Amino acid sequence: MWQRPFYHEGMSELQDRFDGRRVAEAIERHRKHYEFWDDEKALIETSPFFFIGTSWNDYIDCSVKSGDPGFVKIVGPNVIEYPEYDGNSMYRTLGNISQNPNVGLLFMRFDGKSRRMRINGRASIMEDAGAIGRHFGAKVVVRIECEIYPNCPRYVPDLAGATSSPYVPRKGQGTPRAGMEAARLQQGHSAGGRPACAGGQDG
């Protein structure tokens, strides 16, 4: 478990300013978790890519890590590993991790309907033979202990279908709201039995 609060003061101040505190607190109560759900395991195991953000002081970096589906491996209830392949030799991701283990990950499908999985993680760089042996072609392996919370796909386009989200605000059109989903989230449930989707862009 993480010892720090889920939100810092700046986040909480904006939640109060824009009347989002109830939904934000419900997300923490009902959606933050420390063991992968079955649908999250399926997303990880079938994903050909994910996004990772790292930082150290003023050095901020966002990168996409790619491979064949299955290149990210689940090795514990909330622990994943991925291989670092030969790349452009800048070592921005690994360099930041070597100085600051805190990372942010995003797994998603651009289909306009699947939930995004967001991860706050603590990363370590593995160079032992066992870790390298689990990931063919790896120079090193990154292991990440995960704090997990899903987001709904509002505003996410369906790239395969070449359609944009109907929730995007557009001039001359009413913008569909997700108020019912937010209400369900505050109650801690959804029709499918999983915590409901709040539907917001920010977070």
Image: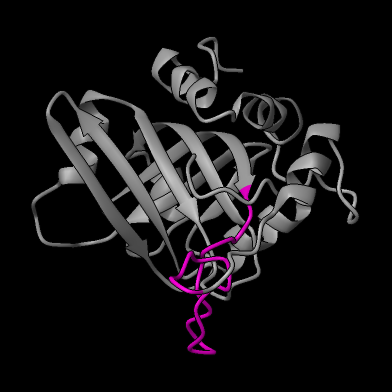
The boundaries of the magenta stretch are: 151-172
The quadrant where residue 149 appears: top right
Q: Position of residue 114 (x, y in %)?
A: 65, 66
Q: Position of residue 95 (x, y in %)?
A: 17, 37
**Residue 158 belongs to the span the image colors magenta:** yes
Is residue 3 placed above or below 175 in the rendered structure? Answer: above
Q: Position of residue 41 (x, y in %)?
A: 68, 55
Is residue 194 placed above or below 47 in the rendered structure? Answer: above
Residue at left offset 79%, top offset 50%: 180
Q: Residue furthest front?
A: 172
Q: Is residue 129 left or right of residue 21?
A: left
Q: Nearer the viewer, residue 85 or 54?
A: 54
Task: Report the predominant secondary structure element of the magenta stretch.
Answer: loop
Residue at left offset 36%, top offset 48%: 52
Q: Is residue 69 left or right of residue 187?
A: left
Residue at left offset 62%, top offset 62%: 43
Q: Is residue 29 left or right of residue 98?
A: right
